[in-house]
Structures are given as C-alpha cells and as structure tokens.
Amino acid sequence: MSKDFAFTTEYTLDKRFFAECYDQTSHRVKFPQAYFKGVLFLLFGVVLLKFELLPSGYVGWFFIVLSIIEAFSVYFKRGWWLWRQTLSMSSGSKVVFQVDGDGVSYNSGQNTRSITWSEIDQLEQSDLGFIFHLGKQRQYISKSCLNDEVIAFIVDKHRASQID
C-alpha cells in the first residue's frame, strides 16, 4: 500500500459502542480469583466478631459489609462501567478517526490523540475490532466503521513497523 494512503471516518460514542469496547478490551476474571478480596474481608470481619478482638463490634461489621460491597462491585462491573461512560461528558459526541501512513488519530471535541505506527507494541484483532497495545495502555477501534481496505492497511502498516 502506498505511503500517501489516507482514510477518515466518523462514529458516535454511544451505549452500543461503549458496550462493544468493554466486551472486547476487558480482562476476563475467573470466579474464585475475582471474589478473593471479598472473601478475605468477610473472614477478617467474622474473626473480629467471633473472637471479640476489639471492644466494639463495629469494625467487624464494617469488614462484613465491605465484603458484600466488594462482591457487588465484581458482579456488576460491566454495568457500572457502561453507566459511568454513558453519563460522561463524551457520551453522544462524534469522533473523527483518521488512518494514514504515519499512524492513526482520534479527534473528539477537546480530545485529540495521535498514535504513530511505531508506538503500537501489539495489534490485537478480533471479529469486531482492533485493540492497539501501547505499553500498559490499550485503545479500541471498532471495525464497524472501517472497510476491508483500511483493515488490511492497518495490519500491513503495523507488521511493517515491527520489522523496522
């Protein structure tokens, strides 16, 4: 593909996009490990109450309630994240996404971000989109706003940047 390739598209940050973004980028947690901290809080609270280690039982009950809140935070993690995103200032705004020979860029009102091909450590591709790994940070772009030519260009440019 030529170096002067350029593609621009626009998409809206809506609940459907946020849900796709979360589902594609979130780290899956396994059942026992996800609730480990909550179980520790529960055990600590029960031990404080059972053995009356403190003059007041309020601290024990605090840890028991904290364990319940922790369990809810794990169970409702996706819904909570989606709710926060849909209430954010960026919800409903238009994003202009550009792909060219230098890299990719996003422009959404006051937020502008440019990513060169060499900054992308890993390109993860799923059925629904791309995840750009930038160190510990990840950026998601949905394939719903891209055509086949742009998808092939992104894959080729990332592969070429890794060889250089």
Image (cartoon, rainbow, N blue to C red):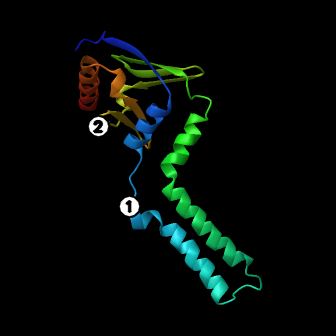
Give me the residue at 55% from left, 22% from top. Answer: 93
Q: Which residue lies under the disc numbered 1?
A: 30
Answer with left or right where residue 116 lies relative to residue 127.
right
Q: Nearer the viewer, residue 71 or 2?
A: 71
Answer with left or right where residue 94 lies relative to residue 124.
right
Indicate whether 33 appears above or below 54: above
Mark 1 Cα shell of 10 Å, populated few (<14), some (14-19), many (≥20): few
Which disc, if any, is residue 16? Answer: none
Q: Which residue lies under the disc numbered 2?
A: 126
Q: Quadrant of residue 130?
A: top left
Asked if one can make out residue 11 in the rendered structure from this viewpoint, the answer is yes
Question: Counting residues from the N terminus, which is met first, the one under dot 2 or under dot 1?
Answer: 1
Indicate whether 64 appears above or below 26: below
The amino acid at mark 1 is Lys
Give me the residue at 40% from left, 33% from top. Answer: 140
Question: Which secondary structure, mark 1?
Answer: loop
Question: Which secondary structure, mark 2?
Answer: loop
Where in the figure is residue 67, as x and y percent of width and height? 58, 68
Indicate whether 81 appears above or below 46: above
Where in the figure is residue 120, as x and y percent of width and height? 36, 33
Where in the figure is residue 78, as x and y percent of width and height? 48, 47
Q: Residue furthest bottom?
A: 51
Give me the residue at 53% from left, 44% from top. Answer: 81
Give me the residue at 40% from left, 50% from top. Answer: 27
The amino acid at mark 2 is Ser
Mark 2 Cα shell of 10 Å, populated few (<14), some (14-19), many (≥20): few
Asked if one can make out residue 138 in the rendered structure from this viewpoint, the answer is no
